[in-house]
Amino acid sequence: MAEDISPVLSVKDLKVVFSTRKGEVHAVNTINFDLNSGELLGVVGESGSGKSVTMMSLLGLLPSPPARINGGTVSFEGKDLLHVNPNEIRKIRGGKIGFIFQDPMTSLNPVFSVGFQIMEPLKKHMGLTGRKAQDRALELLELVGIPDPKKRFKDYPHQFSGGMRQRVMIAIALACDPKLLIADEPTTALDVTIQAQILELVRDLRKKLGMAIIWITHDLGVIAGIATRVIVMYAGQIVEQANVEELFANPQHPYTKALIGTIPAVRGERAKRLNSIRGQAPTTLKEPHFCSFHPRCDFAFDKCTSINPQLIEQRKNHLVACHLFEDKGVAVG
Amino acid sequence: MADHQPENEPLVEVRDLKVYFPVLAGVLRRKVGEVKAVDKVSLDIMKGETLGLVGESGCGKTTTGRAILRLNDITDGTVRIKGKYIHKSSLKEIRKIRPTMQMIFQDPQESLNPRMTVSAIISEPLTEHQDLSKKEREERVFDLMDSVGLNRDFATRYPHEFSGGQRQRIGIARALALNPELIVCDEPIAALDVSIQAQVVNLLEDLQEERNLTYLFISHDLGMVRHIATRVAVMYLGQIVEIGKSESLYSSPLHPYTEALLSAVPEADPEIERTRKAIVLSGDVPSPANPPEGCNFCNRCPKAFDICHKVEPTLTEIEPGRFVSCHLYNG
């Protein structure tokens, strides 16, 4: 990809906090990343790592209160999404930015037909009416591989299976030719054979339409097969970022390494015993002035408890936030 | 577990197990059909082994597990545990056998009473089934907490104070309280984070080693089942389509469904992923209320031929210990 093309999306120093009874939880803590056109950025992390919150905050979908954006910018097509007025973000959501959620049952409205729900963004964002909207909707259903779209057009969500519903969600997300598609755990609720169908479809659509995609998941297997670049999140921070081949071949951060080691393979050698990561993920009640992973890390040393490591480029396009890879000679404290 | 040698004697023998649920309709709630959740399932679980039961949602794997413990009513067929037939036993008789068979549930959040302390949860089976003094019971609870890796100081806390992985440990301690021989683990790791799943699976393996436990491990996580199971049974639409030793089943799946299922699992390795060719099955699983004629899998099977649409295949042993239910191998 040419270097001079500016990224589709650029997130800088994003911070999100949630007010709770126990205090403010720092769910997202100084996140920085860029997304180039045609890229599929995989975001992995365990529950509570802040991956969904990051993406929801881009779209202005976080309920506030309790959520509060505590700083940062998100530039998309020359606008800062965090500071545009609600009307404008409504135009972008579902228009230039499409999204797919985990559970296709709860994200579709049960009282409207599938056809109606696909036509909705077409009417709202593209100003299509009547026949034209319907034709485009049928085209979309065809595109996402719903057999016999004319017949299924008037059906309601409950008449579709899980996989088919997710296809409908994808059709809705793609309705207005988005520049960016955000998919939050889109295959987690599906069975493996259905997941394989959906992954195949997304690969296909990406080739045909070429939009940038952010794919949030906890499944490293899915990421390995679909992403071009990967961000690993832990406790609200990015701990590692690299191209997919590089990340799996040379994981640097102890968390990434351990995470890859916990997954039992379906093919090849069978591990005698699984590697596990001791302890559990923390809640970030304070803005950390230490590495959030240090209580679970086998390589932690004194610096890890006193300074929060920065994301630094270790190898070409490979960023890691870990003191192990900084110049050990200048360890402070 | 390959490093843990199971004995060659069945603890559980299930023959032609059927669990049908009635479909009721109309004002009079008349029965208009039935959902064949489990249809003619036969399997053995050997002493000390882990039998993995895999399949997609709705294939009947949980119902099979529950029926073996008589938590579901059995429509037809026999279930024998330790040589004793239990499929027709009265609830009173079942109650006597229950200590030998326990269950670990999927969601530790919902299977623990939020108003009971950890110690009360773990000691409940002891109060129900054994006559222990308060002191003995307390000792036993502490022992159990030690063996599942829970801090004794937490005994007076309530479930909401624990994380998912710790809650699952409480559930495991409760299941162990009566020194069972068989534990049915129903998706015990599905609700947990990846880094915690490995902890729980390692714990289950250690406990099996220590106490010579037998597991029926129900899961849709094919990688984890390969790791933990001695033998694996694959279910589709209420029936077992293939059963065999874990290693041979994963390395050379025979039934077209097993083959497709395994090929669909993504591997956390971009090198493999680039070349992996998933057999993408068309369509969805049919409703168990209305299965297709002939083989249940015939309408999605890439290898189906004419007989598959007419005659139902039977589970046949095609090599020692390897059973397949497919016409491709029955001739």
Image: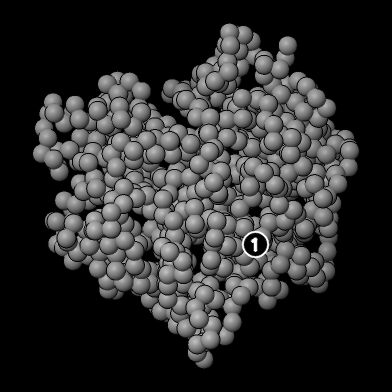
Residue B201 spot, x, y in % from top left: 68, 55
Query: In screen coordinates, is B325 left or right of B5?
Result: left
Residue A16 spot, x, y in % from top left: 33, 70
Question: Residue B187, relative to residue A72: is it above or below?
Answer: above
Dot 1: element: loop
Task: Depth check: give the residue in front, B173 or B197.
Answer: B197
Residue B220 position by quadrant = top right
Query: In screen coordinates, is A15 left or right of B214?
Result: left
For the point 61% across and 25% down, which residue is it?
A: B256
Task: Depth check: give the residue in front, B10 or A71.
Answer: A71
Query: In screen coordinates, is B242 left or right of A188?
Result: right
Residue B34 position by quadrant = top right
Residue B143 position by quadrant = bottom right
Residue A217 spot, x, y in % from top left: 45, 52
Q: Does the rendering let one see residue B111?
A: no
Label 1: few (<14), some (14–19) or many (≥20) C-alpha neighbours in 10 Å: many
Question: Residue A261, relative to residue B58: is it above or below?
Answer: below
Question: Residue A191, relative to residue A65: is it above or below?
Answer: above
Furthest-bottom residue in this view? A333
Question: Residue B13, relative to residue A220: is it above or below?
Answer: above
Task: Depth check: give the residue in front, B101 or B234.
Answer: B234
For the point 52% across and 48% down, which residue is it?
A: B270
Which chain's residue wears label 1? A
Residue position marked by numbered label 1 in the rendering: A276
For the point 62% across and 65% down, which residue is it?
A: A277
For the point 38% across and 39% down, which residue is it?
A: A202
